[in-house]
Image (spheres, rainbow, N blue to C red):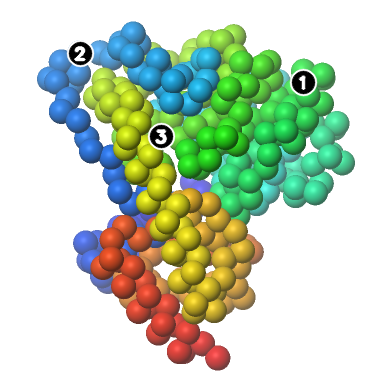
Amino acid sequence: MLEHGGRLRQAALQYGIGETDWLDLSSGLAPWPFAVPAIAERAWARLPETDDGLEHAACAYYGAPNVLPVPGSQCAIQLLPRLRRTGKVGVLSPCYAEHAEAWRRNGHVVREVMEQEVDFYLDTLDVLVVVNPNNPTGLSLSPERLLEWHARLVQRGGWLVVDEAFMDNTPDLSLAAQSHRTGLIVLRSFGKFFGLAGVRLGFVLAELKLLKLLAEQVGPWAVSGPTRVLGQACLLDYEAHARQRERSERASERLVALLSQYGLPPLGGCALFQWLITPHAERLYDFMARRSILLRLFPHNSSVRLGLPGDEADWLKLEHALQAYAQETP
């Protein structure tokens, strides 16, 4: 299993601090969960059915012609490599590590490429995987550039897989409306923007033929009845979407300013997190953890990612810790 953010219990044990005392900024989730609606007993008592309106709500929210609900986009990341014969796969890196791992585990030859290397290698690849906006760097690529890459791939029967887990705040950059195109697969995460990662819900947007093949791999009843009810209610709450976008954008700008104030200007980020490289990343991570603030550490490139504080008490706690770190750093 690869390392991920959100391992609060492990940090609590390691540092001897109770779980309820932590400010968890490690996962890049919106810290304001959407309200959980009342869920009728029949949703718990019966097997889930696929004509309850969830797919229709998701198509409307994402602006996509076809969707397949899955128990978290991680499920699709692991299953998509099974739908192709082994070949050469490029993964725009650094990014969410599960992408490269999933293709490797299924026998594909994986090359991790930088943004400026894609055009050079693209005609040798069968699949290109892009996270947009990227996690953890926050890099955003234009739809026009991605569609150019897709056009080159599809000429040879290739795929472009675009993971849009952090796209909800910038829907104009999404390829959802183009996801009916052959060889274009878009992944969307529900838990991050809606602040409900525990429900394990995601969506795959692609042409119907591919979605049917993927559905066979996922199997029946993969998304629970209660999750379908909750997901549909959240996807249809357009007023709450606007509020969530506004406050996450404000909080992200505030986080940039706060980090910069104490000598840690982010190198990249998006509406739900900020990312910075520092030669002292491990020291910063440990310093914050000892003050019950959990960050996401990336040791391989000496960087950290910080999610958004949820309320004024959280902001004050983070600011005091950053102030103390700045005073102790030469």
Residue 316 x %, y %: 31, 73
Say which residue label 1 marks: 154
Estimate the x, y position of residue 239 in percent, counting from the top left.
Answer: 32, 35
| Residue drawn at x 15%, y 15% as measured from the top left | 42
Determine which quarter of the picture holds residue 289. Answer: bottom left
Reading the chain from its start, which is encountered first: label 3 or label 1?
1
Q: Nearer the viewer, residue 137 or 288?
A: 137
Name the quadrant containing residue 193.
top left
**Residue type at tag 3:** Phe
| Horizontal side of residue 320 vs 109, given as left or right | left
Point out the frontmost of discs 2 and 1.
1
Q: Which residue corresponds to mark 3? A: 190
Q: Quadrant of the C terminus?
A: bottom right
- Residue at position x 51%, y 59% in the image: 274
Q: Residues within 10 Å of mark 3 (few under 14, many from 20)?
A: many
Could you tell me if the residues under marks 3 and 1 are in contact, i.e. CB atoms within 8 Å?
no
In this view, the residue in front, 1 or 127, is: 127
Residue sticking out furthest to the left? 41
Q: Name the residue under label 2.
A: 46
Give left or right: position of 42 versus 315: left
178 or 40, which lies in front?
A: 178
Image point 62% across, 33% down: which residue? 162
Q: How far apart are marks 2 and 3 (CA)?
A: 23 Å
Q: Which amino acid does label 1 sit on?
A: Val
Packing grade of label 1 (10 A; few <14, some 14-19, many >=20) is: some
